[in-house]
Amino acid sequence: MQFSTLLTHLSGGENQPLFLGDDPELKAAAALDQASQGDLSFLEPGNALLAALAETSASALLLPPDPELHAKATERGIAWISLKNPRLGFAEALEQLYPKSPLPCGIHPTAVVDATAVLAEGVHVGALVVIGANSRIGAGCILHPAVVIYPDVEIGPGCELHSHAVLHPGSRLAEECVVHSHAVIGSEGFGFVPTASGWRKMPQTGLVLLEEGVEVGCGSTIDRPAVGETRIGAGSKIDNLVQVGHGVVIGKNCAIAAQVGIAGGAKLGNGVILAGQVGVANRAVIGDGAIASSKSGIHGEVAAGEVVSGYPAIPNRLWLRCSAVFSKLPDMARNLRQLNQSN
Amino acid sequence: MQFSTLLTHLSGGENQPLFLGDDPELKAAAALDQASQGDLSFLEPGNALLAALAETSASALLLPPDPELHAKATERGIAWISLKNPRLGFAEALEQLYPKSPLPCGIHPTAVVDATAVLAEGVHVGALVVIGANSRIGAGCILHPAVVIYPDVEIGPGCELHSHAVLHPGSRLAEECVVHSHAVIGSEGFGFVPTASGWRKMPQTGLVLLEEGVEVGCGSTIDRPAVGETRIGAGSKIDNLVQVGHGVVIGKNCAIAAQVGIAGGAKLGNGVILAGQVGVANRAVIGDGAIASSKSGIHGEVAAGEVVSGYPAIPNRLWLRCSAVFSKLPDMARNLRQLNQSN
Amino acid sequence: MQFSTLLTHLSGGENQPLFLGDDPELKAAAALDQASQGDLSFLEPGNALLAALAETSASALLLPPDPELHAKATERGIAWISLKNPRLGFAEALEQLYPKSPLPCGIHPTAVVDATAVLAEGVHVGALVVIGANSRIGAGCILHPAVVIYPDVEIGPGCELHSHAVLHPGSRLAEECVVHSHAVIGSEGFGFVPTASGWRKMPQTGLVLLEEGVEVGCGSTIDRPAVGETRIGAGSKIDNLVQVGHGVVIGKNCAIAAQVGIAGGAKLGNGVILAGQVGVANRAVIGDGAIASSKSGIHGEVAAGEVVSGYPAIPNRLWLRCSAVFSKLPDMARNLRQLNQSN
């Protein structure tokens, strides 16, 4: 695809400064330092930009609005366009340069679809998929090989379920959700009542609800509660190997990184970001737009917009200072002993 | 089901104070603050009880032995019974209100069962299940779709294996075990010998043994050892995404929360509770009834009955105090500098 | 197998001191304290050796070069050989005592192999395996039941894929790789661009490459990047439930323990060892031979050969001293208050 053609697919690319050069034919995309001829790449503020630009072999670039970078790229004869959000442009460009080949509609002959299941139009059901009784699959859904859907599941239109995803009874997916390989939606919550003769299972009769556009990563598990629902808000994205306990409520447009664990009954507002390996305790409450850095452990409440770190989690700036002092504790202890002696 | 009928199914409900009211017809169960007409709910000590009771729309309640609560419920015309353990009663009630429909006995025609496998009476083998050579499945077991059982596995009566559970060679499950989706039992332990030419695999010839009533959560992995066995004691419950290394021994009635990792050769006594994301190091030893709070990291030994926290784990009360001081470290450091100057 | 026969299979066992005794017939292998008659066992420096040796019921032993142990074993009539690396010898012995029965070549009739897939000679394809279009499977590969291979995957000779392993499009495995149950190779990286209307997916068009001899544990996930590759170096071993983010580069002969998380773009050198539950942040760089102890959190850079601990990770020795002081923080705070008063 020629650079000039690609530009017509970039939102916000109209009337932006650009340099077409020889309007290169783009065959692929690559990181700036790995790009070769025929590659598109992008820069965003924060990279060591000018140096990288001086060395790249890319044929075309999406640049931030920085005249110095523009001049440099032109000087090197590299085609470019200036975009407010070059990363977004790169996402749009990748879709053009690497178009997905559509999967054919229809049910693979080895799939096992219960007679009472209802499939809308345009569904792709791959090999060895299992669809249980009374489940409903929305229009245009893609079920890759070996997906298992238990009975009484409802999936909205345009969802994609990757190989070995499992949806347990009662799960509800709104439109355009993506469930990656080995994710488990709607499994039994870890609910047991202590008794004199050991742990007694609390039946988990609730369900899991994913609102529109939710994405659940590989191997992640989202449990259903004893009663009521576990709910993931619209547009929230969950990375791999994340545990979401029974009765958790996650707001809209949250981003939950890999290996996070959210214990039963916790509530996250909208736009919450949890970095990798964060733990959230039972019934903790996290306000809108709060951010927890990696490995934080959250009990109680985090106010909206707060940035927390550490375990137990405290405000990030305080934690950074405390952690710096932590590594000087042996010196402080020695200092204290000296002061005791001199007093 | 009418409330009066439900009461006959609650253990310890005989001769307890109760108020039948108009003996409501119960259709479902719900949390107190989400209950509507026709719902059963429960209270247990520790909730903000009276206020919640004043507002609930539930039709019937399981209450703790608290006359004030009883009076309030009666006043509002809500049917109730007093139970020593309302949570246990709620578990029993859920079984009545949401009865599981039994799965039919038999082997789905798409299942692949080796000719040498032995299946007892009353087994349900779902679609696309694979059962390897010389494996034995006990009476009444339920194997959901796409379970894979390698050769030489023995499963006791009454076990339930959820979709995509995998049991590796040599695994032994006693009666009434539950293995959730994507759990892996009996996989090769992570055993490699360092050599001049790299890591050399130590063959893992041992096996994994689950005693009766063990439950293993979604995506959890329990490795077999080089020699000997990895053993999970009767009644122990393991949540999702837990790693149990080769040669680990877990006692009876333990509760292991999500994302816990237990390294090779560690030994847990009976009744041990590990909260989420706890790590237990190689060959650590944890005594009966010990508790580790979330994210603790345990090396060496934890005495029976001890409650530990932190990394490295220390007694919980001490850790709470230390953590409180941690957040004042910058102040302490400044204070110390002042003292140095004034001395 | 008789002890004398076994010895011919142990590398470095020639011309070593030994005591054949009555050249016992060995039927199995066991840990020293669990061994019974007919068992082979081994000791290595660091065990409480003499005492254990005095009590074992093993029939034959692989011993380190320690004349005192040799004498004791002879005295007890236990056959033994002295080896520089008894653990390595034990690995070799296990292969002899527990030979794997080879799986037959061929494609199970229930497997679903695309017509355009290319399978080399001697491949075992188990029940209900799915192999997508244009994928290539090398000679002698073993695909256990229910493995799913998406289109456009290339697998070198001699690889073993365990049940429910999933390989996503573009994945490249060199020879002799092992992928354990429920591992996911080549899934979409967690790449989203924040926009005014929420998270927008960054297409993940790159691929995952496992060099020769790589092993990936159960449930581990290795994501492909937006562009370029995620690469695991030759001979590196990855335990269960590990997350490897998009664009990560791991060197040769690394050992990554269970539940480690490595965020996008991080780079590990050769021979790096990460203990359980370690977290590595985006774009962190870890030098050759560095070691991180369990639960460490690594940002920025770790120099080659360094041993780090804690979060944020600091040199291990320093961390040990700081942690020791941490548990005395309440005393220090009190001490400081006293000094303030007395000043």
Image: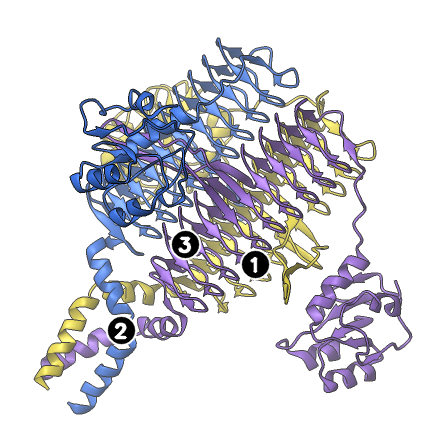
Chain colours: A purple, B blue, C yellow
CA separation in Å, label 3 and label 2: 23 Å
Give amino acid for label 3: Gly
Q: Quadrant of the C terminus of chain A?
A: bottom left
Mark 3 or mark 1: name the one nearer the start of the chain. 1
Q: Which amino acid, by three-letter code, is at mark 1? A: Asn
Mark 1 = which residue?
A253
Q: Position of residue A245 (x, y in %)?
A: 44, 45
Instruction: State whether residue B314 is above or below residue C51.
Output: below
Q: Chain of mark 2?
A: B
The reply to the same-chain question for discs 2 and 1 is no
**Residue B82 lies in what quarter of the image?**
top left
Quarter of the figure with the N terminus of chain A? bottom right
Q: Report helix, strand or loop for mark 2.
A: loop
Q: Which mark is residue B328?
A: 2
Q: What residue do we see at 27% from left, 64% from top?
A: B323
The residue located at (24%, 76%) in the rendering is A332
Tell me the CA gap for discs 2 and 1: 34 Å
Q: x%, y% of residue A147? A: 64, 34
Q: Which residue is mark 3?
A: A279
